Amino acid sequence: MDSKPVITLKPREEDRLMRGHPWVYDNEIAAADGAPVPGGEVLLKSARGKFLGSALWSPASKIRARRYSRLDEPFDRSYVVKRLREALACRLRHRNLEIDSMRAVFAEADGLPGLIVDRFVGSHGSERGSWLSVQLLSRGVDERRADILLALDEVFAPDGIMERSDAPVRALEGLAPRSGVAAGSVPDSVVIRENGLDFAAHIGSGQKTGWFLDQRENRAAAASYAHGRSVLDVFCNQGGFSLACAASGASAVLAVDSSADALASVEENASLNGLQAVVRAKEANAFDFLREEEKSGRRYGLVVLDPPAFAKNKASLEGAVRGYKEINLRALKLLEPGGVLATFSCSFWLSRERFLDVLDSAAADAGLTLRYLEELRQAPDHPVISGYAESRYLKGCIVEVVGPR
């Protein structure tokens, strides 16, 4: 066990790891013995010498070590294949491998720290196939890129692998951005199926890995309230909520986003599904748009709010809370009597309790009473792991306006 470098924690700093959290921060370390190298394997021990597991070392990051196993075992190609097969088996319990696109690997939640893999099943032209979109976001997995790509090919046998390691978080690991085809051939756009609808996932150029798979079930849930209603979808991105609502019988859908590229995707996806007569796209800043709509007196039967993460870190939380409060307050004021709001936050730093408090506070300021219809979370292929709060990041609510307070 002692052949690898050993990281010894300060007294009582092991409590979080004992509960299941995978990270060791720089200020929790008492000593590093044995000259650990960037991306290398290290063993973790408590101040009293208790073995805590194996981790990958990242000297440039505040997250200095990321535990991948509670055992003393190497992070090699064999280990990656084992974890990939376990992750796939987990997804197959609630997904159809032949037709469903899915998040195939969710980093620490699947024992592969810093590795994100989305699997897209669909068509490009007349060809049908499967492709992987991969992010290597930590020093440990970046150092093992070649082995990881071979393991992904062995387990998933994709037609191609696109690397999208261009997220800003790589800079915190001392890594430069990298993006491009890593194996096989990958079309820029693949038409995937979700909730009975076709969507063009831009694997090579879309945000993050090309499509936000974590909202699949939530799009269906929100759309179940859309029949016969006028719908406003703010921060619409590529139109997942908009198209789901239109297909469920919405009388009209207005999709709003500040990105012209996203709105072009909305129009493309509306055309793919023959819904272009129902869905209209509008380029606008969400905050400005909501203020102007409120002034205009226009009302909607269903409003969807799916903003990006306003809180990127703890320091930005209070400002983010104000932002969430404002958009929810203005959205509530745009609802007709009996209207429905589907609202979300993907900020880990905004807790479920704080999110619900923001919504209650917005309702109070709007002078409205809300009925909570559904509380939502990320899709099951983005697993939540006990002891690792960061794996529980997406929260949402569907509420109905009951009447004035």
Image (cartoon, helix red, strand yellow):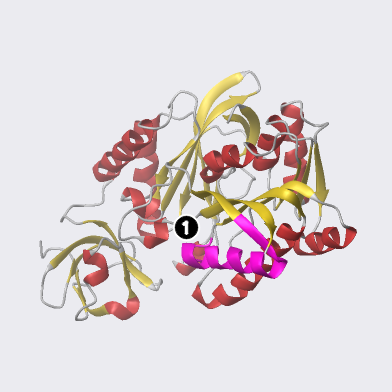
**Could you tell me residue 63's position as x and y percent?**
37, 69
**Could you tell me residue 356's position as x and y percent?**
53, 63
- Quadrant of image for the C terminus: bottom right
Question: Over which residues does the magenta segment extend?
Answer: 347-370
- Quadrant of image for the N terminus: bottom left
Q: Residue furthest top?
A: 126
Q: Relative to 53, is 282 above or below?
A: above
Determine the residue positioned at 34% across, 60% down. 388
Task: Indicate yes or no whether the magenta region holds residue 2.
Answer: no
Of residues 223 and 21, the one nearer the viewer is 223
Relative horizontal placement of residue 49, taking residue 208 as reference (left or right): left
Q: Relative to 199, is 337 above or below?
A: below
Q: Is residue 203 visible?
A: no
Q: Which residue is mark 1?
A: 393
**Could you tell me residue 24's position as x and y percent?**
30, 70
Dot 1 falls on a residue whose secondary structure is loop
Relative horizontal placement of residue 235, taking residue 20 as reference (left or right): right
Of residues 372 and 73, the one nearer the viewer is 372
Relative horizontal placement of residue 248, taking residue 143 as reference (left or right): right
Q: Relative to 14, is 393 above or below?
A: above
Determine the residue positioned at 29% across, 43% down. 83
Of residues 37 and 18, the one nearer the viewer is 18
| Quarter of the view holding residue 62 | bottom left
Q: Is residue 142 visible?
A: yes
Name the amino acid type tagged 1: Tyr
Of residues 209 and 358, the one nearer the viewer is 358
Determine the residue positioned at 70% across, 66% down. 367
| Quarter of the view holding residue 84 | top left
**Could you tell me residue 87's position as x and y percent?**
34, 40
Magenta segment, prevailing SS (helix, strand or loop): helix
Q: Residue furthest right?
A: 296
